[in-house]
Amino acid sequence: MYFPASHLWIIPALPLVAAAIGALVPRSGRALASGAAIASMVAAFFVSCLALHTALADPAAHAAHNFAWFDVGSGAMRLGWLLDPLTAFMCVMVTFVSSLIFIFSLGYMKEDANFKQFFCFLSLFAAAMLGLLVANSLLLLFICWELVGLASYLLIGFWFHKPSAAAAAKKAFITTRIGDLGFLIGLLWLYDSTGSLLFFDGGHGVLEAATLTALTGKTLVCCGLTVSTAIGLLIFCGAVGKSGQFPLHVWLPDAMEGPTPVSALIHAATMVAAGVFLIARVYPLMSADQVLANVPLHALTVVAFIGAITALLGACIAVAQNDIKRILAFSTVSQLGYMMLALGVGSWTAAIFHLLTHAFFKALLFLGAGSVIHAAHHEQDIRRLGGLGAKMKITFATFAIGMMALSGVPFLFSGFWSKEGILHAAHEWDVSHLPLYAGLAAVVLTAFYMTRLMAETFFGKSRSHESGHAHENSAVMTVPLVLLAACAILLSLLAWPSPWLQHQLDPSAHSEPGGISLMVLSIVLVAVGIGSGWAIYGRKPRATEASPDPLETAAPDIIAALAARLGFDELYAATVGRLNSGFASLADFMERWIWGGAVTLLARFGEFTGVVNRETDENTLNGGFDSVSHQIRGTGRAYSRAQTGDAHGYMRFIALGFVVLMLFVMLGGSR
Amino acid sequence: MNTPYGELLVALRPELCLVVGALVALAVDLPKSSRSPTQRLQISSTIGAIAIIAALVCGLDAGLPGQLFSGVFNLDMLAQASRAGVLGLALLTLGITAGTSRLRHPAEFVAIILFATAGFTLMAVAQQLLLAFLALELASLSLYVLAGFDKTRPESAEAALKYFLFGGVSAAFMLFGFSLIYGITGSIELPEIAHRLAMTDTSPLLMVALVMVLVAFGFKAAAAPFHLWAPDVYEGAPAPASALIASASKLAGFTLFLRLLWPGLGAVSGNLTGTAGWLPVVALIAVASMLLSNLAALAQSNVRRLLAYSAIAHAGALLLGVIAAGTSGPSPVFYYAATYGLATVGAFGVIAVIERTGPCHSLSDLAGLRTRSPLLTGCLFVFILSLAGIPPLAGFVGKFVVFSAALKLGGLAGWMALLAIFLSAIALYYYLLILKQALVVPAAAPTSAPLRVPPVAAFALLITAGLIVLLGLWPSLLLGLF
């Protein structure tokens, strides 16, 4: 069945309608709000599948449907929808994962008083993300991008009565906004230099060859960068903020303050994926400068190194965390680093493949963590959990699958294939091998901290009252886990035996089989990570919650520093934060005393003239009539007298106006 | 001469629908019956609504035949759009009337609204001085009656009398001006007048004629210094009558004068730098309206008078659009007038609903509206912010297109646009005073009971608010017509 690009708006519109329903029903309309959200998401999933089917019929075509939004000046601001395999695959993934997360939320949030609001926000979140995916205009993408930011703010701060949640929401919003500023400047610059923001527009879009050649042809005077490099780097700023890349990764772990389904949504399907998707979408622009050899910097080189730093940093910090969700959060930071690394070294298809597989197994891990937390009465500290494997068999089994997919256990799990693709691409990169080494180191660390998480949570004895009384959750929570676990395995088929997905995404890319030696090396590294993790934490499980961590005893300084997340938050508070408060007090002073004074003065003047004007208008002109007519009414005379007085007063004024205008015209004419 | 009466009949189908509707409404109500006033109102407003909808359908069905009946009518895009706009605004007014009015003779009220609407639609299509004058008088006489319809309140009678006297004198000015134009050019048909004027020099007599016409225009548009009736009438008339006077009447009036001034008298427009013509006069009236009304409104404490001064201010901005219409076409003025009409109909509708249970004179009568009726508050929020010109509402786009058209003209018109922008900032203050009362200030004890909004009125208000948002987000719906 053929699905035209002009109908793509249906996909984001469905959850948007659900969000509207959720916003309008009263608080008691829980069933209606959640039902609408889930139904719209499932419907959007089927529509997305239809769109994918259409897109795969001709993978190289970028079917776009553009329309004028409003006219401005001599031109028109145009928006559009775009249907290609990238959009379609992402839509299918987002709708599928979101549907399962929505269903999971039914169980997880069932005791919350603001249940229906939660589903309203979730739908808005999904709608914004889907709008971002189908956009064929950087402007439309930016609008949805900001809506994603807004929805994440609402959801992270959903339990806003907790001060930490309110602060985390604010932090996420402001941190990503810093990146968005760069994005916005890049967007304006791009519009300024090309006059269009459409991606594909029959040869005139910003991602099409003619425009790109024009952009790379221009260089900046100050530093020798081409304009496309500069714009690409500015747009990358937005992705750095949204996808939690170093140095703006600080908001992502704090975002754990939101309800766990929200964390799953942010980390798997909606928020952080947006940054990677953005770079993949504008990949022709980012890579336009690759053809030039004599430029000081290629945009993608920056992307690769930022990605490598993030991958390694996230994995290191995750080793020293004790909160189950925080470990997963830093693991997301690290995995996003991988994706950026892949983008940077030139294989955007590998990045998108990893994005898709990661979405499934990270959603699985977060929902699994949610299941644990729900069962253990909101206990999140892995030192106080333990021994849950026997009590929660389904959660344990599915979580284990997620863990193995994330660690990259070979052959059976999708994570292995997507990670292999990235390492392979990094190996091929001829600029530097440092990103490859960072990626390989992160492989060991990932396997290590995930083994630690498994061992502490599910093995040994229960170390607290809460975990002692945990039991398996209802089917509404476990069925999504099982489905996601199945996907975490089945998605291997997209890459093996042949790299089908990558070929569909970019038919022009040549795909050669990965080097066997690299694959063996990464398998060995995974084995080392899991083995050492098991040796340290699994063989001799922690006895009580207070017993020391073996690593902490071995290297207390390093672990303490990592546990404090290398002090990034403190650093930002001491520099950017303090600078900002300084500016704020200065602005406050100016506002209060200088501008405020001037405005008050003006306002007083305006008020004064207004009073004068009213007095003349009402007392002199109307007042005369009013007093006359009052008098007349009082004495009870015929109304005809009032009529006469009225006529005189007003008619005189008409005549006066006529005379003044006549004089004006006559004098004007003689000039 | 073979007069094409068949063509006339087809072209005037909307007016026929309106007149027949009015007569039917009267006839149905005529026999003595035991029906309550509410039932009579329901019946007659249903008939009225059917008549207006039929007129709308007929009007849209007619297409764009252009010149008709040897040039007496001109059914171009502006005419058809204004006709549809006027009918739509009248329909909304009728919705508010049906939901709120408690008059003793509802059928007559509805019938007169329909007669007034017929006058408006004729104003929109007229291209001949005689027809223009007749249409204007049909509309004006109906409006005088509507303003004085509430015989239980002396203010209403006072308003009607003032409106009538002022209107009568300005009609005399207009007729005098028209007859002078006829004397100079020997024709009452606008294309012919334009043709003759292009060949003759300007004479003082012509200037007198132009200024006389503009005096009448100033009255119709409630522009300073011919605005004195507006605050009294807006205050005294029943709320639906005020709504009609402020919205549909204004849209029709601006359409008529746009057609009269540019295609008709365009040859003697003069220019803003001092050549004699009607442009400098319109500019003077526009500046006076904007300055006077915005300052006077600052000190107002009566909601209706405040809306009246706001109407005068908007008339000034619209006149600026009339000045720019020579180069930018009629679309900015039309868009502005139509969306302004929507916002005022809505604002008066909210007042009408509040007045069902208590007074709504001073600003403090709105206090605590937020808790009394969230629906009304939400609608009022949209209307007032649209009047103030806050994006993304239609009022903003209207201001934007009119001011940018004036800025494109440059010179004095550009400075006038800057003045208008500056005064918009001042205007925001008094608009926000209304919202402050509705949203922030708690209700005084005796009036804090929840308000019940009649379903018809709620429907009309929601449609109005929805249109304002829609046209603001998608201005091309109207702007793209021309």
Image (cartoon, coloured by chain):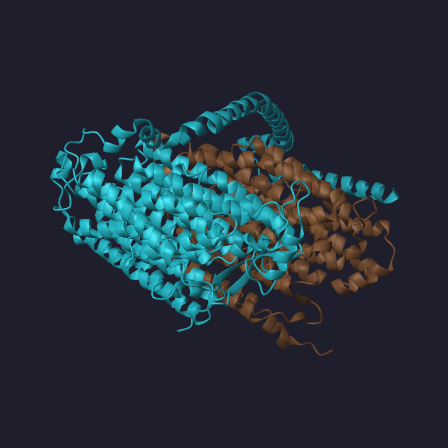
Chain colours: A cyan, B brown
From the viewer's perspective, tell me whether residue A86 is left or right of residue A668: left
Q: Position of residue A619 (x, y in %)?
A: 62, 29
Q: Nearer the viewer, residue B236 or A203?
A: A203
Examine the rendered structure and indicate whether residue A48 appears above or below residue B172. below
Task: Compare residues B274 and A542 and report the one nearer the observer.
Answer: A542
State the image coordinates of residue A132 (x, y, percent, origin top left): 45, 54
Q: Is residue B183 visible?
A: yes
Residue B429 as seen in the image, left or right of residue A543: right
Quadrant where the C terminus of chain A is found in the figure: top right
Residue that appears at 69% across and 67% down: B72
Name the residue at 68% across, 54% down.
Answer: B257
Q: Position of residue A429 (x, y in %)?
A: 49, 52
Q: Is residue A601 left or right of residue B377?
A: right
* Number of on-image labels: 0
Q: Residue at x 60, y 38 (%)?
A: B424
Q: Is residue A464 above or below residue B328?
A: above
Viewer-side residue, A409 vs A167: A409
Front residue of this view, candidates A29 and B285: A29
User: Is residue B170 visible to the viewer in this orientation of the structure?
Assistant: no
